[in-house]
Image (tube, rainbow, N blue to C red):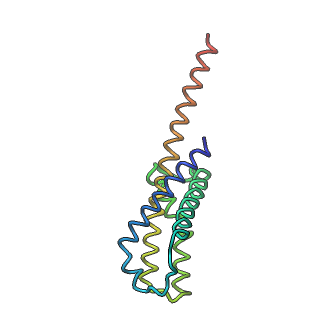
Amino acid sequence: MGSIRVLLSGGIAGIAALVAWACIYLLIGPVQGGAPELWKPVGNIWFAGVVLLCVLAALIYALIYTVIRKGIVGGILPKGLLYGAFLWFLGPLPIGLLVNLTLALPSEIIVVWLFGSLLTLLLQCVIIAFISEWSLKGEDKWKQESTSVKARKTRR
């Protein structure tokens, strides 16, 4: 059941990340379009790579969540938000700050990327936490029913 939980939560979170980034891009397109010389041409291979990387990253996030979920306190929403913020502080934030120090990209683009990655990670991690915790509750209920059936059989 654990592998199915990881695949399901990671797959759904990866698709949600794609939708979230598409919405964010619609809002921030003018900011990024201000420096067309920075961007490579995009096509089908680029889009396939983005889809693959979003889903792969979400699967990794889901796998890590299944390992550390007991160490995160709170309900489903606080767990997801805390995990998403934790991932953002470990990944996009330091990379964005390093890019800002190293490359001659406009700071507005980097701020938009950081904000977009924060929103996307929070969304992904809430989805992962919800699916993981929800499926675990169903699994626990099934185990309890199974145990009570066995107990009734042994009493007879």
Q: Position of residue 26 (x, y in %)?
A: 37, 71
- Residue reaching furthest bottom? 104
* Residue occupying the far right of the picture: 154
Quadrant into which the N terminus falls = top right
Image position of 7 with respect to 39: above or below: above
Across and down, in percent, residue 83 comes to 52, 59
On screen, residue 8 above or below 43: above
Q: Quadrant of residue 24?
A: bottom left
Q: Is residue 49 above or below residue 137?
A: below
Residue 97 picture location, percent across and down:
52, 80
Instruction: Choose between 10 and 90: the one closer to the eye.
Output: 10
Which residue lies at the image location 62% right of the left edge and 51% below the top edge? 67
Pinpoint residue 63: horizontal percent, then vertical percent: 60, 53
Q: Residue at x 46, y 61 (%)?
A: 122
In which image quadrant can residue 58 be found?
bottom right
Q: Is residue 17 left or right of residue 90?
A: left
On-image quarter of the C terminus: top right
Q: Is residue 130 above or below residue 104?
A: above
* Total number of numbered discs in the rendering: 0
> Residue at the location (57% across, 58% down)?
61
User: Which residue occupies 51% across, 72% down?
Assistant: 43
Q: Nearer the viewer, residue 58 or 95?
A: 58
- Which residue sits furthest top? 156
